[in-house]
Image (tube, grey):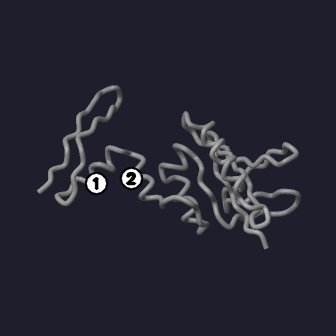
Amino acid sequence: MKKKIAIAAGGDSGEFEISIKSAAVVKQHLDPDLYESYLIIFRNNEWVYTSEDGEKILINRDDFSLLYRGRKIVFDAVFIAIHGTPGEDGKLQGYLEMLGIPFTACGQATSALTFNKYFCKGSWCRPQCFLLKGRIRILNQLLKLPACPVL
């Protein structure tokens, strides 16, 4: 039996189109003899699968499934190809973790931390590691971040 793979693409960032291209490459390289792949587009608050005949089908958010041609499709795994939110900031990972659906990429906590470079750097400022000085712009104000000391 073929594994059903959702390829999550799109998102709510300026990299929407790049994410769609990334997902197309993933779909192209998944062996159709082994996998049924479904491209799921995330945009604003919609999660949509578009069938080969152009029918747009909303994802059931209760269990991340879709009803297609009278058949309920439950995914065995999700390949996350979303750039930005909700695929890089931990939101989608947290949702999938709650449902028990395996996915590519790191988990919710790691994604959330690394998505925010300021908090990520702060979490690593420990005596046993060294980080270079950095800059971050918050609400048009440039903040200079000190380097973490080496002891």
**Percent x, y of residue 64:** 67, 59
* Above or below for 143 versus 69: above
**Pick the front one: 34 or 146:** 34
Q: Amino acid at mark 2?
A: Leu
**SS under mark 2:** helix
Q: Amino acid at mark 1?
A: Ser
Q: Residue furthest top?
A: 140
Residue drawn 84% across the image and 43% down it: 54
The quarter of the picture where the C terminus appears is bottom left
Residue 69 located left or right of residue 22: right
Q: Give residue 104's mark.
A: none
**Percent x, y of residue 37:** 74, 58
Mark 2 nearby-residue class (10 Å; few <14, some 14–19, many ≥20): some
Q: Give residue 113's mark.
A: 2
Residue 54 located left or right of residue 101: right
Q: Are marks 2 and 1 in contact (CB under 8 Å)?
A: yes
**Percent x, y of residue 85:** 53, 44
Q: CA distance from mark 2 to mark 1?
A: 9 Å
**Percent x, y of residue 77:** 65, 64
* Above or below for 92 versus 42: below
* Above or below for 37 versus 132: below
Mark 1 nearby-residue class (10 Å; few <14, some 14–19, many ≥20): few
Residue drawn 72% across the image and 52% down it: 28
The quarter of the picture where the N terminus appears is bottom right
**Pick the front one: 126 or 139:** 126
Which residue is label 1 attached to? 123
